[in-house]
Amino acid sequence: MENSSKQWRFEGNKRLNSASAISVRGVLDLVIGNLSTDDPRPTIPLGNGDPSQFACFRTSTTAEEAIVDAVHSAKYNGYAPTVGVLSARRAIANYLNRDLPYKLSADDIYVTSGCLQAIEVALAAINRPGANILLPRPGFTFYESRAAYEHLQVRHFDLLPDRGWEVDVDAIEDLADDNTVAIVIINPGNPCGSVYSYDHLKMVAETARKLGILVIADEVYGHLTFGSTPFVPMGIFGSIVPVLSLGSISKRWVVPGWRLGWLVTSDPNGILQKSGIVESITGFLNISTDPATFIQGAIPQILENTKDDFFSKVIVTLKEAADKCFDGIREVPCLTCPKKPEGSMFVMVKLNVSLLEDISDDLDFCMKLAKEESVIIVPAGMAFGMKNWLRITFACEISALEDGLRRIKAFHQRHVRKQ
């Protein structure tokens, strides 16, 4: 038996505890933990953006065959270069060049373990003592978590629901100071389902240039748009302001578990090279893990050979689901959706707790909804800093979505405040 008086010199890293507290996963775990084991009905997962479990969102056969071919080739059983397999980097550059007015090369591409690692690389590369970064509210909370871990100060600018969740550009200049180094733009939007126009993105680029800061463009949902506004990559404005473009195959190919992403220096003027950012990116990758080599080996075949009909099918499915979700929300009096989603896999919904008898806020709503109806959605107050808002994903089987919306409506009726 160990002597209880012994003093050990190690303890847990409290920085990790505080950083991980700011995460959608943590909030979802809390809500999921309130599910009732007595409910025989299947749980309806309207909380996270991983529709790969649903047959209607199965990835393309081209992608599956590319993985098999890469494994059978026996060319990708060893370690990959720090910045990624050259053939994968060339293929990613060619894929992105379809939408750009200038040409990226393989030297501009850094292969990462999903888009999450691309975020880690970007924030580490721009960090310096006293630096701060501008993040959208609501936005993807991993930026908050990683910034907290990096001791990178965060300042929030609002996205405006009455203007289609556009960036409050005027507020950016008031927020920034001499220690501001970057602004994060998520387009198409998570958690809002917004898609920004060319003119709006150009305005953001010009504002960032005026402030002397770079843009981190999170485009993991790139091309997943189904409204009237087409997807415009921020890299188009790379000649106005340096852009770190982040992306992956996770969402467009519906394979988040394959963990293959990229960070791109969209900067034809070479400012990121001169400022040392490129060296910092490589330095971070030298001391971090790599995506699986055989996944990298499959990338050329995946990007070059996937047929348009696969992408079209995904878009049609998402649009149908988004329409069903929007219409279903309108039938629940305590919920209001300011704008029908036009991209990504999510929609933000305003919760009016004054219409409900025994619901105190968005977290209470989600916890009781999970317990009583086995429906999982995200409370945006805890997850995104938007009290009494909810994030709902519509990326699932239509039948499951319709069932989930019926259960939400029944939950409202059971808790509606008596007149």
Image (spheres, rainbow, N blue to C red):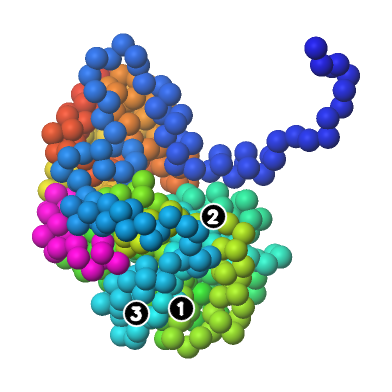
Q: Reply above or below: 190 against 246.
A: above
| Whether residue 165 is visible | no
Q: Does the magenta stretch include residue 304?
A: yes
Q: Find residue 107 and name its label.
A: 1
Counting residues from the start of the chain, the first of labels 2 and 1 encountered is 1
Q: Quadrant of residue 20?
A: top right
Q: Is residue 269 above or below residue 17?
A: below
Which stretch appears magenta?
Answer: 300-318
- The residue pinned by badge 2 equals 289
The dominant secondary structure in magenta is helix
- The secondary element bearing badge 3 is classed as helix
- Please give the name of the residue rendered at 86% of the width and 16% of the height, measured from the top-left corner: 3
Q: Which amino acid does label 2 sit on?
A: Thr
For disc 3, the marked residue is: 236
Residue 381 highlighted magenta (yes or no): no
Local crowd size for mark 1, using a 10 Å CA cut-off: few (<14), some (14–19), many (≥20): few
Instruction: Give above or below for 160 relative to 331.
Output: below
